[in-house]
Image (tube, helix red, strand yellow):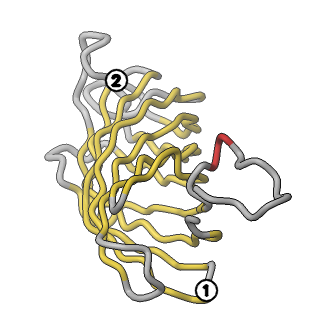
Amino acid sequence: MTRAAGSAEPDTLDACGYRQAGFSVPVIDVSSADTGHPWRGTYGYCLWQNEGFVLHQDWVLSYLNAKPFRGFPGGNGVGIGTDLLFRWHRDWQPSLLPYLDMGVGIQYAAGTAFPADGSRWMFTLHAGPGWLVPLRRERQAYISLRYLHLSNAGVVSNNSGYDVLHLVFGIRWGKPD
């Protein structure tokens, strides 16, 4: 990363020059059981980049609607956590830009476990294609279709898990140097 003479040092939490905020909604259940739905809001930034590869972190706030399942009562709650994404795209030119991302994350549920027969600690796996859509020189919209798996990774005996396709959309501002 290069900076003009006299400019401030780069922010270590934003080494690539952009931030983004988004929202994701469940669109197609892949799980065989009707366990409820998580809705996710994110705020993130790039941690590292090299050519077309990016390591990106999102802070996640989820609304959890856990339906009663296997004798567990269900309920509504909030999940707080973080995701790490590994993203690949061909360049950073201001044009329609396809990308692929995959990642892992961890969340803690306050109010209810999700799914209802799981635990308050949840781990996520996700992957999917997306597109950056130019709006201005340093601002893009993004949209992706992401497969999301959410479970407690076996930390307790009940681990039904949840699988869904999420539609993710948001805005990204700033640009890499």
When the figure is inspected, residue 46 is found, relative to residue 24, above or below; the finding is: above
In the drawing, does residue 143 fall left or right of residue 102? right
The residue identified by callout 1 is 137
Name the residue rendered at 48%, 54% in the picture. 39
Q: Quadrant of the N terminus?
A: bottom right
Q: Which residue is mark 2?
A: 118
User: Residue at 28% across / 49% down in the picture?
Assistant: 102
Question: How packed is label 2: few (under 14 Cα within 10 Å), some, or many (20 or more)?
Answer: many
- Kind of residue indicated by mark 1: Arg
Kind of residue indicated by mark 2: Gly
> Pointer 1: residues within 10 angstroms few (<14), some, or many (20+)?
few
Residue at far front of view:
5
Residue 103 against residue 145 in the figure, above or below: above
Quadrant for the C terminus, please: bottom right
Q: Residue at x 53, y 62 (%)?
A: 23
146 with respect to 23 (left or right): left
Quarter where residue 27 is shown: bottom left
Residue mark closest to the camera, 2 vs 1: 1
* CA gap, disc 2 and disc 1: 45 Å
Q: Position of residue 34 (x, y in %)?
A: 26, 47
Q: Position of residue 36 (x, y in %)?
A: 37, 47
Left or right: residue 43 versus residue 68 is: right
Q: Secondary structure at mark 1?
A: loop
Q: Give the secondary structure at mark 2.
A: loop
Front one among 76 and 46:
46
Nearest the camera: 56 or 24? 56
Closer to the chain start, of discs 2 and 1, is 2
Image location (x, y in percent) of residue 153 = 27, 21
